[in-house]
Amino acid sequence: MQNTWTPSQRAVRAAGQPISELMTQALGRPELISLAAGFVDQSTLPAVEIHAGIDALLEDSRQTKHALQYGPPAGDPTLREMILARQLASDGIAGRAIEIDRVIITAGSNQLLYLLADTLLDPGDIVLCAAPTYFVFLSIVKNIGAEAVGVASDENGIIPESLDETLRAFKEAGALPRVKAIYLMSYFDNPASRTISADRRPKIVQLAKHWSMKSPIRVIDDTAYRELRYAGDDMPSLALHDEDDNTVIVAGTFSKSFSPGIRVGWGVLPKKLVNPVLDQKGNMDFGAPNFSQHIMVEILKQGLHEQHVNKLRSTYSMKLSVMLDALQHHLGDVPGVQWSSPSGGLYVWLRLPEDLDTGPDGPVWPIALKEGVLYVPGEYSFPEQGIRREENWMRLSFGVLEPELLSKGVELLAKSIRRGLEGSL
Ligand SMILES: Cc1ncc(COP(=O)(O)O)c(C=O)c1O
């Protein structure tokens, strides 16, 4: 008898993620100019700052040994205190008594998103997402056997009236208890670089509380791009509007504002979620890399993080201008092609005429690959359910490439779009 092996249901659901397709293309053809990768700028990575952080740590042999040992599963207490103090200060709620126990350090914020999904969702449960949304989060939800449902959003983020309507429809269908969370990126989201406007922020939290009838609906505020602001003033996170601290989960990371390689992310969680999330974390790694956390403490202590963010802001806003100028130059005269002009984040969100599919089965993708340029097809960022999945968008990243290659990439992309448009006439 032949032994056959089939992967678990979860492994089957994990297969075929968009990220794998993109990585395969990018790695298989290194000559491609990638406007797809959401990586940070290589030249700005904080090698000098890391050196200073490590030097300071190594000067103290007791601390060094401490850092080389396993750390507490929730993370290093000093780092947690520093992160909480920063968040409370930037949210303007420095006086709010939030216990340090509610802060958990994770190996990047993606790990936190995974742990949250694992803790909040059973198969068949629902997460509402502003559409478009972070496509890796969609894969996480799918992996668990839960469903992501897209809610309409515009330049000011998720539309509260649409969120309300969606929740009402679930209530009327008797499905409200399946809705466990609303996932949002309230600053410069991935892929559209939209920020939720100040007037919408309290409404969203109030709606989550209002519709938390039989079971709580948590709001996950993924703040990955908060610090990458190139114009205007910072705004408090959604946590400001959660007065009883039982609805909003803030996810943060040093990946975009400092270094993704250091893999330090965090969550500030409602108290009731802390132990269940830590139980899952115990199964996964019983603590994020301790050495990285100790280095981050030194970096924060010396003010090197703030300094670095200031440098990043000028590099990225220069690159954003390069991309916007190139788009205007090469596509400004093409009817029906529009793009966002964000004031932060790492992405420009570009729209083609309605019937022009940007996905791997559409006309533009193969031409772009032939021309030598890669982008993220917008359809990956739309949940399968909820508002209609739109196929005529592209996510363009300006973070990674040097200015000349950015311009060249946009030129090749424009050529592909024009040819795609001619073919569709
Ligand atoms: C919106 C968003 N959240 C979370 C992450 C995960 O980042 P990390 O795990 O490096 O903290 C990313 C990475 O691109 C992202 O775009």
Image (cartoon, grey):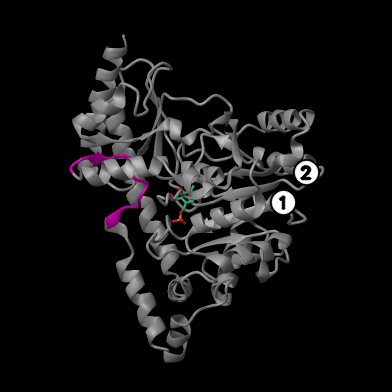
Residue at 36 percent across and 57 percent down: it is 311
Query: Left or right: where does residue 152 sit relative to residue 175?
Result: left
Q: Nearer the viewer, residue 348 or 216?
A: 216
Residue 313 is covered by the magenta coloring? no
Residue 35 is covered by the magenta coloring? yes
Whether 213 is drawn above or below 412: the answer is below
Q: Nearer the viewer, residue 381 or 13?
A: 13
Disc 1 and disc 2 in contact, CB within 8 angstroms: yes
Residue 341 found in image quarter? top left
Going by the numbered disc 1, the residue's amino acid type is Thr
| Local secondary structure at mark 1 | loop
**Residue 85 at x, y = what percent?**
60, 67
Q: CA distance from mark 1 to mark 2?
A: 9 Å
Whether 338 is drawn above or below 255: the answer is above
Residue 369 found in image quarter? top left
Write down the region rendered in magenta: 31-42
Residue at 47 percent across and 75 percent down: it is 290
Whether 135 is drawn above or below 311: the answer is above
The C terminus: image quadrant: top left
Give me the disc on residue 247.
1
| Local secondary structure at mark 2 | loop
Identity of the residue furthest to the left in this view = 31
Crowd class of label 1 (few under 14; some 14 to 19; many from 20; radius 10 Å): many
Residue that label 2 marks: 212
